Amino acid sequence: MATVTAAAPRATLPGILKQPVVRKLLLLALAAAILVPLANARWASGSWPAALTVDFSDQLTKASVWIIDNRDSHPLFLYFFGHISNAVVISVRAVYLVLLAAGWAGVTAAASLVAWRVAGWRLAAGTGIALLACGFLGMWIPTMQTLALMVVAVLASVVVGALLGLAAGLSGRMDRILRPVLDTMQVLPAYAYLLPVVLVFGMGVPAAVLATVVYAAPPMARLTALGLRGADKEVLEAVESLGATARQRLLTARIPLAAKELLLGLNQTIMMALSMAVIASVIGAGGLGDRVYQALATVDVGAALAAGIPIVLLAVVLDRVTGAAGEGLGDEPQPNGRARWVYALVAAVTVAVAGRLLGRLDWPEAWTLNIAEPVNRAVGWMTDHLYSGVPVIGGTADWAAHFTTWVLDPVRDTLQWLPWWSVLLIVAALAWLIGTWRTALTAVLAMAAIGVLGVWTPALDTLSQVLAAVAVTLFLGFATGIAAARSDRVERLLRPVLDVFQTMPQFVYLIPVVALFGVGRAPAVAAAVVYALPAVVRITTQGLRQVDPAALESARSLGATPAQQLRQVQLPLARPALLLAVNQGVVLVLAVVIIGGLVGGGALGYDVVFGLAQGDLATGLVAGVAIVCLGLMLDRVTQPTERRAKKGA
Amino acid sequence: MSTAPATTPGATSATGTPVFSVDGLWKVFGPKAHRVPADPELAGLTSAELRARTGCTAAVQDVSFDVRKGEVFVVMGLSGSGKSTLVRCLTRLIEPTAGTIAIDGEDVRAMDKTRLRELRRHRAAMVFQHFGLLPHRTVLDNVAYGLEIQGVGRAERRERAAAVVAKVGLEGMEHRRPGQLSGGQRQRVGLARALAVDPEVLLFDEPFSALDPLIRRDMQEEVVRLHREEGRTMVFITHDLSEALKLGDRIALMRDGRVVQLGTPEEIVGSPADDYVREFVRDVPREQVMTVRTAMRAASADEAGSGPALAPDATVSEAIEAVARTGAPARVMEGSRCLGVVDHERLLGVVAGTNQRKEVA
């Protein structure tokens, strides 16, 4: 963009018109010149005109009341949703009972041995220690509840995702239908999925599991399709030349060839499922997420941390073990591998039986370590000493207050002060400049839909938080990314940190920011920044490092300084990666800003939480749809012409 | 060409139906491809004109040839000449647009799915440029794959595969994965996989293009050896002229989807059909391709009785060596009969390329 504005004054008039950017802007200005006076004359108003809103709350309330009234009698529920609901409850219950029956020793042994076979003894030790740590923190039971829910949700997600992926991988038409849907599902904040399932299933485990499946199945479907489609054409041709039937081709060639993508899909599905299983505590998932949720509601940071640490440990262990399974794929099969699996199985069963015989099924009370109190004392000390009044640098609460006063408030007020049509115009211009007229149209329609839903003002509030968080994220992310791209040492230091941060569920980030900044909009923004930063840093670093070495070398041979190399070669060539970083940053920030509604972020996120808490599903649903629209709009506005690989991981 | 004597008898003695018989074959890619071969006006256009007129690309245009039993039939052309499309049409990996293909007199284009699968399973096996191996299987299981597809039992197919693995010189590597092999070794696996199903015809699609020159020579010799031992019919696609000359009993030279010349290596080098072919073979060392049969002249009475003796299909370079050693013209002998002689003048004429055309013509 910089080059364009710099070049424009020097160019002659036809030259200017040749620039696609200028042409797009001129067209847009023309459209605006006609439409804006018309709109302004009819609905002059700073905020979204009331004449253009449609109130859905009556219908939604009616629908939700109807569903609640008919849940036990209508055939749709009796013979369809009821069965699903029962099946989910029974299977979660069954897995939970099995985990309890195996006892803590049995579960730890089984998990460690599986990790040993799949990923080596190091990760096996890590797995064992992580599970024991969950016990020490007094979180064994909630951990098992979360695990039980995860097992069922992941199995269902994998089955659903693999079937969809198989369909998309084998049929071009299915691929064309599914791809945009899956793409869009992947950019929507997790919160948006909660309300529709609650509407149908009510609060509780079935709703939580189904929300998790809806959230976690898309990556499996995407990667399955990708793997099936990406198979080496010549291998498939060779298989066909030998006279394989379609079934033989699928089973002996296409699926094995896609094994890497399938395992990556499993990995992503598990991570997303964990993330959602924790968030779904707001709709009755129970387990670790519920402990965090309850603790945050009373600003009990110690209790939140005690439940948060097991979540992080689970996330890291699950990610590393499934990731290692994918990496170890092409290796030489170990001799007597099958025998070792048998040993592992026998050992796990022995430990479980021994635990049972010794009567040590439940985690021994004496072994728990109560960290809540010391943590709360530490937080109390921080509140007293670091919150405000620290000489020279101020305090964390002061920073939060300043950030709110000097950044968040002005941005929000400006957005809300802007005439509604100018917001639409800005959205259109940005989306069109970065992407195509299609993305621009989608973005404008999504934004307008928010107005029609009557949540224009809270949506702009959320948007202001997103903008502030994105600005901070991009500033920090690009700076760190550039540093990491230029220095191997910085990258080596950053990598393990990024690895851990990228695996943590969104929910967990709320705990430290509440400890540091209290509640309000600033902590929500801070959590969003921390959550989105790793992906932005990683994509930036990769993009800069993948710049054609020949181009860089030729610049160096011409005597360019490091700064010139960066500005004139690396950044322009890495433009697609940087745009992707912006896109991912926006999507990730939005997800957490919405969750920030739990810690005083207000706006749309709060409406969802409020709707759930008060049983006012209409408010929640409208907010949920608005979140979807906002997510869609933000994604389309920042979507480069060609969408690259998803997710920074 | 030292192997030519070993292979030619097999090729020439073969009578009866050819293995593959291709007649008027077309493959057109693009919208409404079928109208192109059917319309004489469109069919007469060159590829570029056709693309401009209809948006269609004619990869193979009106190609006809027979592959005789036991011969190595080489299809040679630069990239984009349609040779890879042509070989895929033979087993309908690519569906031809028009024309007929027969294998042992049976119409390939009329085959139903089952029959076609039978053809691919038992009668024609293919070796690919980038090997097309399954990376998750061991060498042995890759070689046995064709048999597995046919439903051969595990023990039997492994036994048969092991024998073929030994035949292509990969003993001891049965349990490696393709990723652990060098390019040459991988192509040996590809070759073994095709051989394992014991096909009537082997199809090679530029099998050695991706290999280093030295490895490539090894592999070419491997193919020559296999052909000498088994006498299997082979259709060999290549863009490398020296490879074509080395392996081919007959060569079809393709350009822009059409066969511009079909003949023995000697005919192609000795009497190019047009300027394109002439340009193509210009740098070929003629003395290594041309035989004394074409280079000789009639012997005078005294010449017929003395001088070194050569077989009629000895190459000119062998004759040069003999003539240079003895200093006298060499006799071309078939049994005890003298067919003619080659002297300094005739041999130099071949090397210089001055007398060949009128002689052969």
Image (cartoon, rainbow, N blue to C red):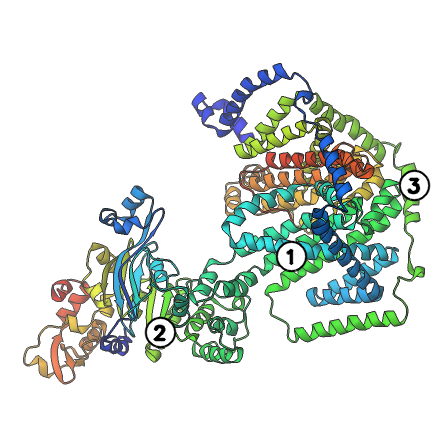
Q: Quadrant of residue B205?
A: bottom left
Residue wearing tag 1: A159
Residue at x 58%, y 28% (from the top left corner): A428
**Of the residues shown, which amino acid type is indicated by label 2?**
Glu
Residue at mark 3: A380
Inspect the image, locate mark 3, and give the three-letter code of the amino acid beneath it.
Gly
Q: Same chain, marks 1 and 3?
A: yes
Give how far across and how far down residue B242 sits, in percent. 30, 65
Circle 2/circle 3 CB separation < 8 Å: no
Q: Residue furthest top?
A: A41
- Residue A486 in view (yes/no): no
Q: Nearer the viewer, residue A370 or A162?
A: A162
Q: Residues within 10 Å of mark 2 (few under 14, many from 20)?
A: some
Question: Element type at marker 1?
Answer: helix
* Marks 1 and 2 on same chain: no
> Closer to the N terminus: mark 1 or mark 3?
1
Residue found 28% across the figure and 76% down from its top: B7
User: What amino acid is labelled 1 in the image?
Assistant: Val
Q: Could you say which disc has been placed on residue B200 in the image?
A: 2
In screen coordinates, is B39 left or right of B111?
A: left
x and y, in percent, of residue A273 in the image = 71, 51
Camera-nearest label, 1 or 2: 1
The answer as to whether the residues below labels 2 and 3 share one chain is no
Determine the residue positioned at 75% across, 58% down.
A91
Is residue A432 or residue B97 the one in the foreground?
B97
> Disc 1 is attached to a residue of which chain?
A
Q: Is residue A36 left or right of residue A82?
A: left
Local SS, label 2: loop
Residue A231 visible, this angle:
yes
Measured in 3D between alpha carbons, the distance from the residue under mark 2 to the one under mark 3, in whole angstroms, is 85 Å
